[in-house]
Image: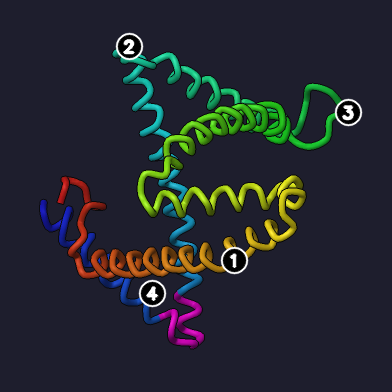
Amino acid sequence: MNFFKRTIPLTIAFIMGVMMAFQYYVPHEASQSLLKVVTRWGITIAGFAVFIGVYSLFHLHWNKIKRKVPGWGYSTFVFFGAGITIIFGLYNGGEFFLNDKQEGTMFDWMYFNVQVPAGATMFSILAFFMASAAYRTFRARTGEATILLIAAVIVMLGRVPVGALIWEYLPPLADWIMSVPNMAAKRGILIGVSIGAIATSLRIIFGIERAYLGGGD
């Protein structure tokens, strides 16, 4: 059983990982054909993965409803939203059917009348949370916190019209902070993330990282 659960998946991961790595650096017709075939495989596998993900989602929330765990009422909205979405997708080919003057599909209507207002509400709540977190963070207890506080105040004032009224050099200074120190730190983070992604990929290819197989390995 370990042969099917461990050996075969690790072998497939190693072979496909090495093949796709070499394919990127080999500008040959055969490598491009391989990329097209593997891409089609990925689309097919992703289609099956969607069904597995939907089953896992419904199974998780159904167990919450059945066991009456805290917050189980929110799980009912998962089934309600999924049911409405499926009905809108199957009925009338997804086209809007409430009136003849509305343009677009039912999914467009749901997006602009449900998703957008809900997102605006969440971001409004997030704004107050960020203000509270900023108040706690920007207490100048250390040198680093003082630098962070000064830079944040300069950037915030430099991004609004009142900043230019306070000091004419405030907006250019805010732009310099965003384009020089901030960009340097961002590039360092991106380089670190890229190196981490490469290291993780190599660990998966060579079978060192096996968490995706399940079982906590």
The residue type indicated by label 4 comes to: Met
User: Separation of disc 1 and disc 2 at Cα?
Assistant: 51 Å
Residue situated furthest right in the rendering: 101
Q: Nearer the viewer, residue 96 or 173?
A: 173
Q: Which residue is disc 2 drawn over?
A: 68
Q: Residues within 10 Å of mark 3 (few under 14, many from 20)?
A: few
Q: Which residue is disc 3 drawn over?
A: 101
Q: Residues within 10 Å of mark 1 (few under 14, many from 20)?
A: few
User: Separation of disc 2 and disc 3 at Cα?
Assistant: 44 Å
Quadrant location of residue 23? bottom left
| Element at label 1 | helix
Residue 79 seen anywhere in this rendered image of the structure: yes
Q: Earlier in the sequence, mark 2 or mark 3?
A: 2
User: Separation of disc 1 and disc 4 at Cα?
Assistant: 36 Å
- Residue 216 x %, y %: 16, 47
For residue 20, which numbered disc appears in the image? Answer: 4
Q: Residues within 10 Å of mark 4 (few under 14, many from 20)?
A: some
Residue situated furthest front in the rendering: 167
Q: Which residue is disc 1 drawn over?
A: 179
Q: Earlier in the sequence, mark 1 or mark 3?
A: 3
Q: Nearer the viewer, mark 1 or mark 3?
A: 1
Write the start and end of the magenta stretch as one range.
23-34
- Residue 36 x %, y %: 50, 71
Q: Nearer the viewer, mark 1 or mark 2?
A: 1
Q: Nearer the viewer, residue 99 or 181?
A: 181
Q: Is residue 122 above or below residue 30?
A: above
- Residue 11 x %, y %: 22, 67
